[in-house]
Amino acid sequence: MAIIQVPRPPKDAMNPNRPANALLLSQVEHMHEAEKRLPLRYRTDIYVNAIKTEGEVANYIREVTAAIHRAHVDAARQRVRPAPKKRAPVLQIAAVAEESAPKGPNNNAKNKKTKVAPKKK
Amino acid sequence: MANGSAPGLDGLQHIVVLMMENRSFDHMLGSLGADDPRIDGIQNAISNPDTNGTQVKPQPLAEFQGQVDPDPDHHFPAVDIQIFGGDTSANRTANMQGFIKSYFNQRRDVQHSQKIMYYFPKEKLPVLTTLASEFAVFNRWFASIPGPTICNRAFAHYGTSFGRVDMNLLYISEPFQSIYSRLINASPKHTSKLYYYDVASSTMEIVNLLQNQPELFGTFDQFLSDCSKGQLPDYSFVEPNYSDHDTDTGEEVASDQHPDHNVQAGELFIAQVYMAIKKNPALWASTALLVVYDEHGGIFDHVVPPACPPDQFTASANDTGTGTAFNFDRLGVRVPAVLISPWIQKGTVVDRTFDHASIPGTVTKFFLGDYGPRSPREKNADVFLEPKTQPVDPARNLLSLAAMRNDCPEFDV
């Protein structure tokens, strides 16, 4: 079968200044609801009530969509942080302690850091 | 073909759905009825009265852009006028006589309101009309709700809109899982992805999926790459570009065909999706592509939407804006729908009734078999691909050929 030619849209089909239709405005509204749930550092500073054109809609949606993905990626990174180093088994610690540490009620006191109020000048 | 022998279904591994925006069947495919009387398209007897009482017939004068502007109203009250002709009485009958009347309400210009009856001659839509003629075209695929985009798209994702008939998407505590969650949580696990065009177009399925499961999403570039590499998921849902916008690499023209976006850009997009699958021989042999529109966008169609079993939700009289509650017991206006596979007989015309609940219904039954927690509407919706789990009824199987076709069309994209 012969290859069917597909006519391309004319250049003047593109108009990012076209007033946004009801669908796009509702998409902005939904995006804004999603944005409100993001931590502050991911939010945009775009005032959604002032969005009027398709280009403005696209700009806002680009920012929030990317932020949602970024927030999830960052959260996943936090989730897979390396676990803290394993402590030695309790029994070994107890055994070492029995060998080296003198018995007494205050044997740990010297290792404790004491918070001292700064001296008044 | 003998009962149970269905090599096309046996080898089917991928289902892809491309959902376009806001065009009716008669507007896009109605011209095909002149060549093939099996297709329920434009007929001579069809007309709508204008506000002067003059009967106006559909005319093949639709233009790619700049004609249906302002965007025809397709919210619930306006669609009610379009379907019932403005009759609000208790015993009214649907007659599809209110399209001009409804459009007149927006600009109060009689001549302009008649343009809602215009349709495309087939030569102007070489992609969609070729696909409809070459594969399977549905005579009875309706929007799920006589209303706007978001609630109709919800039916494609969840099999219900959870009682919504409007553009509100904030139905967070839904009792039914999306088709994507069903698949990825299944055992054995299946793969699924929603491909939006790019981050500036994003998705219409925001609050429920993107916000909570961004890993389900990819871009159209990724779709093209996944097709090329043979990495397409079991189920893919593709969204067009919803807006004209600039990117780092140039200009992107909206391809969703939502009025007043350019219809040719949508034709090109449909062809790109089709060719991305077709160019990979293994993928082409194992994929079924459904091209469907979310709703009619206020544009004329002549087929009366049928009644259907009600959903378990009700939209209140206040929510519908018509003064009458809605039990989701009738479908919306008819939309274009075409199923594509090299295993489909050329020129197939399907007369069974479908709506967007058929999408999760089909995908669920095909990949998961019996699955309990689904909406009443979805459970009652017909499937467009027969499940593998039962003997295949040859009368229902659209992928019916014994051997794959090698005469399928190609587009210059």
Image (spheres, rainbow, N blue to C red):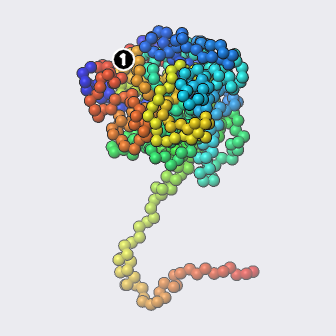
- Asked whether residue B85 is in view, the answer is yes
Q: In this image, B305 relative to A45: left or right?
A: left
- Asked whether residue A7 is in view, the answer is no
Q: In this image, B264 relative to B340: left or right?
A: right
- The answer to whether residue B393 is above or below residue B369 is above
Residue name at image x 70 percent, y 44 percent: A47
Residue name at image x 46 percent, y 36 percent: B310
Question: Which residue does the numbered mark 1 point to in the structure image?
Answer: B345
Q: In this image, B215 relative to B345: left or right?
A: right
**Residue B405 pos. (x, y %):** 35, 17
Location of residue B200 by image quarter: top right
**Residue B133 pos. (x, y %):** 44, 15
Query: What amino acid is found at the position of numbered circle 1 in the picture?
Result: Gln
Host chain of mark 1:
B
Location of residue B3 by image quarter: top left
Nearer to us in this view, A24 or A3: A24
Residue name at image x 36 percent, y 23 percent: B398
- The answer to whether residue A116 is above or below residue B77 is below
Nearer to us in this view, B42 or A70: B42
Which class describes the residues within 10 Å of circle 1: few (<14), some (14-19), or many (20+)?
Answer: some
- The answer to whether residue B134 is above or below residue B316 is above
Nearer to us in this view, A109 or B317: B317
Say how many tags the image has: 1
Q: Secondary structure at mark 1?
A: loop
**Residue A92 pos. (x, y %):** 36, 76
Residue name at image x 62 percent, y 13 percent: B55
Q: In this image, B68 relative to B95: left or right?
A: right
Pick out the residue farthest to the right.
A121
**Residue B39 pos. (x, y %):** 45, 15
- Quadrant that contains the N terminus of chain B: top left
